[in-house]
Image (cartoon, coloured by chain):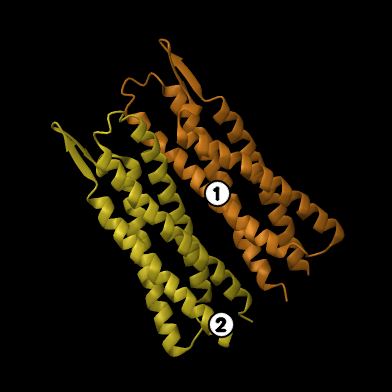
Chain colours: A yellow, B orange
Amino acid sequence: MENSSGSRVTCLILRIITFVFLFISFFILVTTSKTVMGVRLHFNQFHAYRYVLATIIIGIILNLLQIAFSLFNTVKNGSGTILFDFFGDKFLSYLLATGMAAGFGLTVDLQTTDADDEYGEFFDKAYAASALLLFAFFCAAAVSILSSFALSNRA
Amino acid sequence: MENSSGSRVTCLILRIITFVFLFISFFILVTTSKTVMGVRLHFNQFHAYRYVLATIIIGIILNLLQIAFSLFNTVKNGSGTILFDFFGDKFLSYLLATGMAAGFGLTVDLQTTDADDEYGEFFDKAYAASALLLFAFFCAAAVSILSSFALSNRA
C-alpha cells in the first residue's frame, strides 16, 4: 500500500508538470504570429499548427479531469479509476506525441524555405511550443507506464 | 491459460499486420519523387519525410524482433519477454505515432503551396505512406494495450 500511494503521488506530480508544460505551450502557440513588410504569417494559416492547438486544448481538459479524479482518489483512498487512468493516459500520451510531431514536422521544413530568416521569431515560437509539447509528452508517457503497472497491482 | 494463449495469438496477428503496413509504407515512401519541368521534388529533401523513413525502418526492425520472440515463446510456451514486450510495444507505438504525425503535418500544409496541383502525385504518395503508417500505429497501439494487460496477468 505504501508503494501504491507513492506511485500515486508521483503520477499526480507528473500530471501537474504536464499541465504546466501544456499551459505555457498554449500561450506561446496562440501568440505565434509575425508580420514582415505587410505579409503576415499567423499560426492558424497552417493546418498542422491548428492540429497542435487542438491537441493542447484536449490535452489540458483531459489532464485537468485526471488531476481532479486523482485528488479525489487520494482523499478517499479509493482505486476506482484505474482503468480510466490507464486508457486516459494512453490516449493523452498518443495525442501529445502526434501533436508534437506534427508541430516539429512542419516547422523544421518550413524554416528552410525562409532563407533570409525574416520570420525567425515565428519559427522560434513554433519550435518552443513544440518543444514544450515534447516535454509534456515525456511526462504523459511516464504516467502512462506507471498507470499500466498500477493495472497489474489491481488484484 | 486459454485466455492468455488467445491474446498471444491476437498479438502475433496484429504484429504481422503492422509489419505488412510498414513494409508497403516503406516502398511507397522511397518512391515518392516527382519531376515537373526540370524541378525535382524528392522525399529526402524534407527533414520530416526522412524522419518518417527512419521511424519505418526502426519500426520494421523492432517489429520483426518482437515477432521472432513471440514465435519463440509460442513454441516454448514460456512467458519470459512480458516486460520486453511491454516496453517494446510502448516505444514502437509512440515511434509510429510521431512518424505518422510528422508525415501528415508536413504533407497537408505543403500541398496548399502547390496551387496548380502539378506535384499531385508526390503528395498522394506522401499521404498514402502516412496513412499506412497510421494503420500500423493503430495495430501497434492495440498490441500495446494487450501487452499492458498481459503485465497484470503476470503473477
Quarter of the image where one finds residue A136: bottom left
Tell me residue A37's x, y (percent).
14, 31
What amino acid is at disc 2? Answer: Ser
Which residue is painted at 46% across and 28% down in the image? B124
Which residue is painted at 40% across and 44% down in the image? A104
Dot 1 falls on a residue whose secondary structure is helix
- Identify whether B72 is placed above or below A79: above
Name the residue that disc number 1 marks: B95
Nearer-the-camera pick, B136 or A12: A12
Nearer-the-camera pick, B55 or B109: B55
The reply, left or right, for residue A45 in relation to residue B51 is left
From this viewpoint, which residue is outermost toward the right? Answer: B76
The reply, left or right, for residue A5 in relation to residue B61 is left
Quarter of the image where one finds residue A155: bottom right
From this viewpoint, which residue is outermost toward the front? Answer: A116
Tell me residue B70's x, y (percent).
76, 54
How many numbered callouts?
2
Query: Which class describes the residues within 10 Å of circle 1: few (<14), some (14-19), or many (20+)?
Result: many
- Identify whether B28 is placed above or below B65: above
Q: Are marks 1 and 2 on the same chain?
A: no
From this viewpoint, which residue is outermost toward the left? Answer: A38
Dot 2 falls on a residue whose secondary structure is helix
Q: Are marks 1 and 2 in contact (CB under 8 Å)?
A: no
The reply, left or right, for residue B66 in relation to residue A130 is right
Quadrant showing the N terminus of chain A: bottom right
Name the residue that disc number 2 marks: A4
